Amino acid sequence: MASNAPVGKPTDMSSPRLPKVAGIDSTVPAPPDTVAPLPGVPSAAPPSDAALPPGVLIQDRLASWVSDLTTLHELTERLIKTDSLDGALREMLGAGAALVGARRGMAVLEPADGLGPTSTIGLGLAHADLGTIETVPRGSGSYGRLLDGLPEADPPGAGLPDADPPGAGLPGNGPTAPRRPARVPEPIAIRDVRTEEGLDPRHREVAARLGYAASYALPLATEEAGRLGAAVWLYDEPAEPDERRRHLIGLYGRFATEHLARLLQVERARARVATVAEELLPSRLPRVPGVRLAVRHLTGPQGGGDWYDALPLPEGALGLAVGSVSGTGPSALAAMGRLRASLRAYAVMEGEDPVAVLSDLELLLRLTEPARSATALFAYAEPAQRRIVLAGAGHAPPLVVGDHRTEFVETSLSAPLGMLTCWEAPSVELSPAPGETVLLYTDGLLRRTGDATDRAFARLHAAASSVPRTDRSDPGAVADHVLRTLLPGGLDPAVEGEDVVLLAARFE
């Protein structure tokens, strides 16, 4: 894909505002003393340290060290405040551009273990520009060598025995075999794309198209974290960072890699939690004559205990359930799985009596997990008769949405399961009209609004009332409209917040 930018002239996106840091002027590509001399062009001789008094020389060096330490402190402080992989990559890319004296750059997250996630972030580069750079063969001396062309870091203990022999390290038995350190690729500096040897012709073509003349690529790798990816900064003119800037970007790069490694672990943990939560829930919704089902579900980053279920029952009946287990994390997910499995068993045995189903569930919870509470709502539906009998334990009431009404079902107040010595509450019966949709949901949907409970219920009612008539025949469209209206920001799994379950049942 070709960029619309004129050759050699950066566009507005090619001139981003780089962070101002102590000791580094980020407003220019590279100060004269950081630009490497080109072949045939003599460089100005630096001032001789011998001409300076010893005291002045020491003060200058101390001032330079203090300035560098201040710079690294400011940059690492900003980096450590990022809490997402993309945010950390963007911060690292901008700070690195200031350190090496460049205006544009690109960071690639591509863990060597292949487990992901992967990401590509640009600084001063359009999306099409990133795609153009990625067409450069990786083994041509470009940043891609840091991803594919060089040996990846050895995993801990690679090539060595899994355990030391008995007595190793004790007197007379010899020292413990040393662990081989992981191999970290070296940075790659290309001072002039036009004259650099060994470059693929495609590399020169892309450089001419995007208007850059030199690059400096840094591996995002350490011995502890392994290889996570690479970053490359682009110069508009032939240039190369001097030794001081290389040292600073090396220190910052190692810190950034360790921070990215921590965020990567968090992201992978979140993905595993979401996967476990999905596996504990129905893989698909059943098809029962007379009713159409749709569900929208989100597990928060901490892994909550919200769940739902829909199971066919004898004689064409259908059991619908939603619930929430107190707590977060793996223990809450495990409790949610046990509770849902138990409810399915009770529903098969005595589903026509929702109160008995929840009573059995409450007894089980109190005996097996006395320190945990849960809310639940179970509905026994007979679609052919358009009849529903339901009972709730500390749960929000269902909402009926139709052409002629949008109203909450009046249910009796009841404590959550596990809160009372003996739970029991009366059931409620309702008859949905043809074409009406019954919405079952968890409290997380209301809490995600950030409003007080009364206002959250009012907003939910307003969102359901505003469903277009053309969408009311599709329960999935009804659920999507309610979510879009109630939560304009969407359901981002990375955002801290409650789990959300919205189960829609449209009766024909």
Image: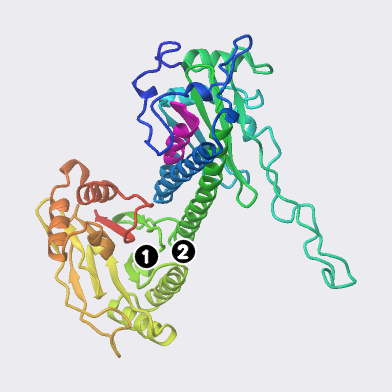
Q: Are marks 2 and 1 in contact (CB under 8 Å)?
A: yes
The question of residue 99 being in magenta is answered with yes
Give residue 278's position: percent from left, percent from top. 45, 58
**Secondary structure, magenta segment, majority class:** helix
Query: Is 138 left, or right, of 91 in this rendering?
Result: right
Three-letter residue code for mark 2: Leu
Q: Residue reaching furthest left?
A: 404
Give residue 129's position: percent from left, percent from top. 45, 22
Q: Residue reaching furthest top?
A: 40
Q: Is residue 390 above or below residue 224?
A: below
Q: How many marks?
A: 2
Q: Estimate how packed mark 2 is, as few (under 14), some (14 to 19) or many (20 or more) residues with alpha carbons within 10 Å.
A: some
Answer yes or no: is residue 227 visible. Answer: no
Query: Is 358 left, or right, of 434 in this rendering?
Result: right
Quarter of image, res 218: top right
Which of the marked residues, 2 or 1, is nearer the chain's N terminus? 2
The question of residue 289 being in magenta is answered with no
Which residue was labeled with disc 2?
280
Answer yes or no: is residue 296 visible. Answer: yes
Q: Is residue 147 above or below residue 130?
A: below
Q: Which of these two is toward me, 348 or 358?
A: 358
Q: Could you say whether the residue bearing mark 1 is in a helix, strand or loop?
A: strand
Which residue was labeled with disc 1?
307
**Residue at image point 44% right, 33% down:** 98
Q: Which residues are magenta?
A: 90-106
Query: Is 205 left, or right, of 476 in this rendering?
Result: right
Give residue 420's position: percent from left, percent from top. 28, 87
Q: Which of these two is toward me, 135 or 92?
A: 92
